[in-house]
Image (tube, helix red, strand yellow):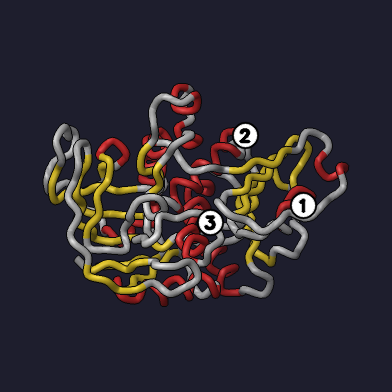
Amino acid sequence: MRAMVLERAGDPLVLCNLPRPEPGPGEVLVRIEACGVCRTDLHIADGELADPALPLVPGHEIVGRVAATGTGVSDLRAGQRVGVPWLGRTCGHCRYCRTGRENLCDVPEFTGYTRNGGYAEYCTADARYAFALPEEADPVALAPLMCAGLIGWRSFSLAGSDAIERLGLYGFGAAAHILCQIATRKGIEVLAFTRDGDRAAQDFARRLGASWAGGSGEASPKPLDAAIIFAPVGALVPRALREVRKGGRVVCGGIHMSDIPTFPYADLWEERQILSVANLTRADGEAFFPQAAAAGVRTETAPYPLEQANAALDDLRAGRLQGAAVLVP
């Protein structure tokens, strides 16, 4: 099978011909229809996340069809469309798994990081961690939901979604453009903060329902109940903290961020909170997919052939994308 392989962090991915994997017990073999390009893939490729399982096939926003099942798989069948997310497997018995926090498992496996992912024609996945997806939907449109959508939803939940009237989104890429649609459908006012001077991203945010869009260096025109930071820029944390009301939350939605500068305690006082989001749980998927369907979420995508994975990563790195890049084998 064809696959784009990361052989060494910091180097471009290499197109390789690899043996097609075989599903082990409890696994499925997935023939990949589409795989989204996530900022986490960029952090892995650039060496900002430690200890990937090199050589590695990246990619964890996978949509495909079950091509074969391993022994013990009963819930999924050959030909069925599934999605394979970042969380690839958990131990099931550590204190976090036992208390409904499998996203914090002590010995997890992650798709496209510690096990091969979706920048290929096929991959294997633990059947328990694959989501059944709509048969009739466009696989390219579905792909960004598998991480950008799920992490956006988890961030939204931790921000206190049921009590938010006004939400700030810092970094208006794949995750924010999905979450903006869900939040506005719920009657929440969304304010979008983009790279300074990025008029295209600001127009994009307003088109998707944001009531205001401006640069991340600008002050918010209204106090925020919560802010979610998707951009990997630590300097945005104290900026966002100054924009939230008393009792407000600032949620950091990325797996990697540059260092957070110091800030005065007065900016945190009055029960403001800073939270990070780590990974996802299967329960997040059970909650998110119906919400995305109810909101009529439409993902903005830029398809690339599998062989152009490096170009897709370059475009993401340079901020040239509106929405999400998706590789199509």
Percent coordinates x, y for residue 260 in the rendering: 73, 54
Q: Nearer the viewer, residue 114 or 197?
A: 114
| Residue at the disc numbered 2 | 163
Q: Which amino acid lies under the numbered mark 2 shown in the image of this protein?
A: Ala
Using residue 212 as the reference point, say whether residue 279 is left or right of it: left
Using residue 296 as the reference point, say whether residue 28 is left or right of it: left
Q: Nearer the viewer, mark 3 or mark 2?
A: 3
Please tell me which residue is depicted at 73% across the width and 58% down the height of the picture. 235
Q: Is residue 141 visible?
A: yes
Q: Is 235 situated above or below 150?
A: below
Q: Is residue 294 visible?
A: no
Percent coordinates x, y for residue 80 in the rendering: 16, 46
Using residue 296 as the reference point, say whether residue 306 is left or right of it: left
Q: Nearer the viewer, residue 294 or 46?
A: 46
Q: Which mark is residue 238?
A: 1
Please tell me which residue is depicted at 74% across the width and 56% down the height of the picture. 220
Which mark is first along the chain, 3 or 1? 3
Q: Quadrant of residue 221?
A: bottom right
Quadrant where the C terminus is found in the figure: bottom left
| Residue at the disc numbered 3 | 49
Q: Which amino acid lies under the numbered mark 3 shown in the image of this protein?
A: Leu
Quadrant where the N terminus is found in the figure: bottom left
